[in-house]
Amino acid sequence: MSAIGALEPVRGAGAGGVFRPLSAEDDEQQPAERESLCMNCYRHGVTRLLLTRIPFFREVIVSSFACGSCAWANTEIQSAGRIQEQGVRYVLAVAARQDMNREVVKTDCATARIPELDFEIPAFSQKGALTTIEGIIDRAVAGLEQDQPVRRATDQEVANKIDEFIDKLKRLKEVDSSFTFILDDPSGNSFVENPHAPQKDEALVVTHYKRTPQQAAMLGLEADEPEEKPVDSVEDLRNEVLQFNTNCPECNAPANTNMKLVQIPHFKEVIIMATNCEVCGHRTNEVKSGGAIELEGTRITLHITDLSDMTRDLLKSETCSVEIPELEFELGMGALGGKFTTLEGLLKDIRDLVQKNPFTLGDSSAPSKVEKLQEFGRKLQQIMEGQMEAHFIMDDSAGNSYLQNVYAPEEDPELKVEHYKRTFEQNEELGLNDMKTEGYEAGQTADR
């Protein structure tokens, strides 16, 4: 699209606060208009740019081009925020017609696949878009049909095969039979809607993963790890607060991140990282496990019966999922990242995460969804105020999560900790199935 060149000078202004939250009540938020070249007829058209901030996706640039001469139009979305720490993969089992209406945010670097048709939309082959599952299929069909007249004139056999494949894509929209839609984004900035939020979507599987060196190179990131400052001993590391430069996740201004190794009583060592932005005042903290993956997974269940339970210290690792059965709520592993906080702090983060869902805000949101989220928020507030009993469950397949036992070292009657053997699928998510550790002492890897 011809407006891409016009985006660059605007993007640099992101740290200055020009990315405003998208709101129907904000009368001052108007798109900027620029004259730009139409790539269809090479005359002048108009590009409209809207710089906004969407929850979960940071800053984005929404652009729309229209040519008054040939009536050609195009729209796209570009991420103006930072690349996330992990990539994300969405696997959706499309089984009903309404699944085609699920909202999708697809960035430039995301790959979309439909395994049943052996069909793939490679990264950077389509511009980023805020669309639906049906919209992605329609864009793919339009791209295949574009060059069909030329193919029919040069190779009729190939053109006929492509026509047959286009028909298969169009029939997918009727959902006569179920199929799988996979969206894989190494930047972590794509999204597929869960229409059942805050409840778990049984048809949607969300997986966060560590990028490969090839994916990091594709995104323009450094493949090599930064050189670490040597320390004399582990004790020196415990007593030292390390600091490194980074960017603020909210306004993208330069900021400093502090990192410290901390010993949690009756548990293990963890690494706490905290960022404080002096420009916008944003603060964030993240926790990484300081030890290895445990031999067994851990399931922690707390029966919340009193307001004092809200003050319990809590460590949630990146591999931990959270469940509140009374609210029919489940938070998958990877969501909210690693956190060292209190039970009340984590419940507040869950409340903010659910209530700021971008697909349930604004005039276009369904009243039933808004009512469901409001009811969820009321019940969660009752739990936080000690007016409603509930069970809080943390399930960590890596065994690196923790919930404080206020009676330690005695047994806590309201706290239950279970250890279990991981399944093959859980080991696969943790990357353990293909890991070989035998035979290194002899200079070779032993066969399993």
Image (cartoon, rainbow, N blue to C red):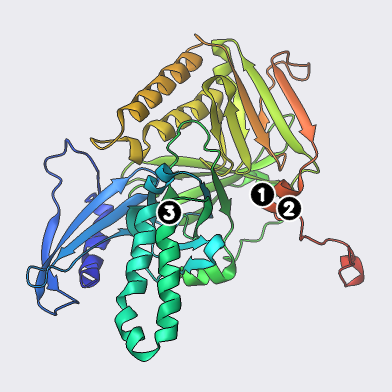
The reply, left or right, for residue 404 in relation to residue 310 is: right
**Which residue corresponds to the image point at 38% horizontal and 66% vertical from the top-left?**
140
Q: Nearer the viewer, residue 322 or 147?
A: 147
The residue carrying pointer 3 sits among few (fewer than 14), some (14 to 19) or many (20 or more) residues within 10 Å by Cα, namely many
Label 1 residue SS: helix
The answer to whether residue 176 of the structure is visible from this angle is: yes
Can you identify the residue that label 1 sits on? 237
Q: Nearer the viewer, residue 350 or 341?
A: 350
Which-is-in-front pick, marks 2 and 3? 3
The residue carrying pointer 1 sits among few (fewer than 14), some (14 to 19) or many (20 or more) residues within 10 Å by Cα, namely some
Q: Are the two marked residues, 2 and 1, in contact with CB atoms closer than 8 angstroms?
A: yes
Can you identify the residue that label 3 sits on? 190
Alpha carbon of mark 3 to alpha carbon of mark 1: how far? 37 Å
Can you identify the residue that label 2 sits on? 233
Rendered-image quadrant of the N terminus: bottom left
Amino acid type at image mark 3: Ser
Alpha carbon of mark 2 to alpha carbon of mark 1: how far? 7 Å
Rendered-image quadrant of the C terminus: bottom right
Q: Quadrant of residue 407?
A: top right
